[in-house]
Image (tube, helix red, strand yellow):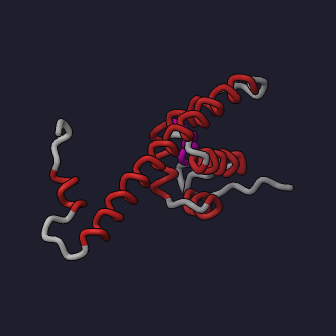
């Protein structure tokens, strides 16, 4: 399979992102910017497509761009280091899920209280939102 060079627009299209995303990744150092020829456009390699797709998949798994940068800097033989980071990310996501479930329960309780009040002037949801944290 030959590796056809790509312009920034073709790279963005091949990766399903916009051109500004490519430029942003370059500013962050996640991908390198090829040198600009005297005449013509910068060209990117298939390896850059692979790298941008890696970044997007890692974002879908919940990794921040800083965390992705760390993953990219790890060597191929550092599976244990990557696993440790993935386990930490999983723990963070599990904590977020617990927090979201608690928020859902709170909202469910407020919604139920609102249903029980029918047309009351003192809406339980509004009252709850008006409370100070120290109340």
Q: Residue at x 58, y 29 (%)?
A: 70
The part of the image, by quadrant, that contains residue 91 is top right
For the record, the magenta segment spans 29-36
Q: Is residue 96 left or right of residue 133?
A: right
Who is closer to the viewer here, 62 or 23?
A: 62
Which quarter of the figure is the N terminus placed in? bottom right
Who is closer to the viewer here, 118 or 7?
A: 118
Q: Residue at x 53, y 35 (%)?
A: 92
Q: Residue at x 45, y 40 (%)?
A: 27
Who is closer to the viewer here, 86 or 36?
A: 86
Task: Please say if 5 is above or below 84.
Answer: below
Residue 95 place in picture, x, y as percent: 51, 37
Taking the view exactly as shown, the residue that stands out farthest to the front is 116
The number of numbered badges drawn on the structure is 0
Taking the view exactly as shown, the residue that stands out farthest to the right is 1
Task: Please say if 18 is above or below 44.
Answer: below
- Label the magenta part by its dominant secondary structure: loop
Which quarter of the figure is the C terminus placed in? top left
Q: Residue at x 65, y 51 (%)?
A: 53
Q: Is residue 52 left or right of residue 131?
A: right
Task: Please say if 115 is above or below 109.
Answer: below
Residue 132 place in picture, x, y as percent: 16, 43
Residue 109 place in picture, x, y as percent: 36, 57
Q: Is residue 55 left or right of residue 121?
A: right
Residue 64 place in picture, x, y as percent: 51, 40
Taking the view exactly as shown, the residue that stands out farthest to the left is 121
| In the image, residue 92 lies in the stretch drawn in magenta | no
| In the image, residue 30 lies in the stretch drawn in magenta | yes
């Amino acid at each position: 399979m030959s590796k056809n060079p790509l312009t920034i627009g073709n790279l963005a299209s091949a990766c399903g992102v916009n051109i500004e995303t490519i430029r942003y990744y370059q500013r962050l150092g996640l991908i390198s910017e090829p040198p600009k020829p005297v005449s013509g456009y910068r060209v990117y390699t298939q390896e850059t497509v692979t790298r941008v797709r890696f970044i997007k998949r890692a974002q879908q798994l919940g990794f921040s761009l800083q965390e992705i940068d760390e993953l990219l800097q790890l060597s191929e033989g550092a599976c244990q280091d990557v696993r440790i980071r993935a386990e930490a990310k999983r723990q963070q996501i599990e904590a977020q899920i617990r927090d979201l479930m608690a928020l859902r329960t709170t909202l469910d309780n407020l919604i139920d209280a609102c249903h029980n009040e029918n047309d009351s002037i003192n809406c339980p949801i509004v009252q709850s939102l008006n409370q100070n944290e120290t109340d």
